[in-house]
């Protein structure tokens, strides 16, 4: 729990710093270039983003030699994504995102590995609130689909350990988000209007166990040892930054 709080605190600090930099360090714009607020109405928006976060629920999967608990979460981790959207009105945007994210063991150890990799598809409706001539806050909500994924825990080099793989069905979830976006009037590349942004997203999803194996041998789904991981909580909080173009 302390480690998760530390990750969230660090990520929040980085996000705030990125937002401040986006607002304060952009290239100067002459007065005649910004005669009115940026209006995205009728524009197609394409974005590439990175994300990093922490899962809400932690599953204990082992211990270090100093008796620190090793955990794994179905949410959080690092990832990349692409997003495309359309703005039918200057205050409204609808977008779809596709990306990849991977969670790792909470502690880095030499003789064990673990990961939970998944692909996500999200649709988000966003309300846009201009706060300056070039900046806007956007709040959004929507739903998504998260691909079938494997929780891969390789503790085979640990005395008494094994290589366990838990396969989960794909699942639907929901999310809410908030972000700040800053447009740069002097950036004119590929006949597009460019922006930088940063924000935070909370999402909720749960994965149902489909199959399980240990050292290549199938484990019956009714095995009592699977009770604690039969439903894998994939909820998390991610902080993200992006570069976007309006065409």
Image (tube, grey):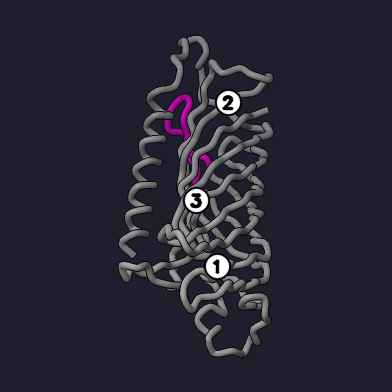
Q: Residues within 10 Å of mark 3 (few under 14, many from 20)?
A: many
Describe the element under mark 2 as helix, strand or loop: strand
Q: Nearer the viewer, residue 230 or 112?
A: 112
Provide residue 46's location: percent of width, then percent of height: 65, 35
The answer to whether residue 195 is magenta is: no
Mark nearer the viewer, 1 or 2? 1
Q: Which mark is residue 194?
A: 2
Where does label 3 land, which residue?
177
Whether residue 216 is situated above or below residue 18 in the rendered picture: below
Q: Which residue is mark 1?
A: 154
Query: In the rendered image, which quarter is residue 28 located in?
Result: top left
The residue segment tinted magenta is 128-139
Please state if 88 lies on the left or on the right of 91 as rendered: right
Residue at 52% in and 59% down: 203
Q: Quadrant of residue 91?
A: top right
What is the CA distance from the residue labelled 3 to the residue labelled 2?
A: 21 Å
The front one of 10 and 123 is 10
């Amino acid at each position: 729990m302390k480690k998760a709080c530390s990750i969230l605190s660090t990520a929040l600090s980085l996000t705030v710093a990125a937002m401040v930099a986006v607002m304060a360090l952009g290239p100067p714009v002459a007065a005649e270039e910004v005669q009115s607020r940026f209006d995205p109405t009728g524009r197609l928006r394409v974005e590439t983003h990175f994300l990093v976060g922490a899962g809400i629920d932690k599953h204990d999967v082992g211990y270090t030699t100093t008796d620190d608990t090793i955990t794994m979460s179905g949410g959080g981790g690092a990832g990349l994504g692409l997003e495309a959207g359309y703005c039918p009105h200057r205050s409204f945007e609808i977008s779809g995102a596709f990306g990849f994210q991977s969670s790792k063991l909470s502690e880095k150890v030499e003789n064990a590995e673990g990961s939970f990799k998944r692909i996500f598809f999200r649709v988000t409706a966003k309300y846009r609130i201009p706060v300056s001539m070039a900046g806007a806050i956007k709040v959004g909500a929507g739903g998504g689909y998260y691909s079938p994924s494997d929780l891969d825990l390789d503790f085979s080099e640990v005395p008494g350990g094994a290589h366990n793989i838990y396969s989960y069905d794909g699942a639907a979830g929901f999310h809410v988000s908030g972000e700040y976006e800053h447009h740069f009037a002097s950036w004119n590349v590929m006949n597009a209007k460019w922006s930088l942004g940063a924000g935070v997203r909370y999402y909720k999803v749960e994965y149902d166990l489909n199959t399980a194996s240990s050292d290549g041998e199938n484990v019956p789904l009714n095995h009592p040892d699977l009770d604690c991981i039969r439903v894998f909580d994939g909820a998390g909080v991610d902080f993200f930054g992006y570069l976007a173009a309006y065409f």
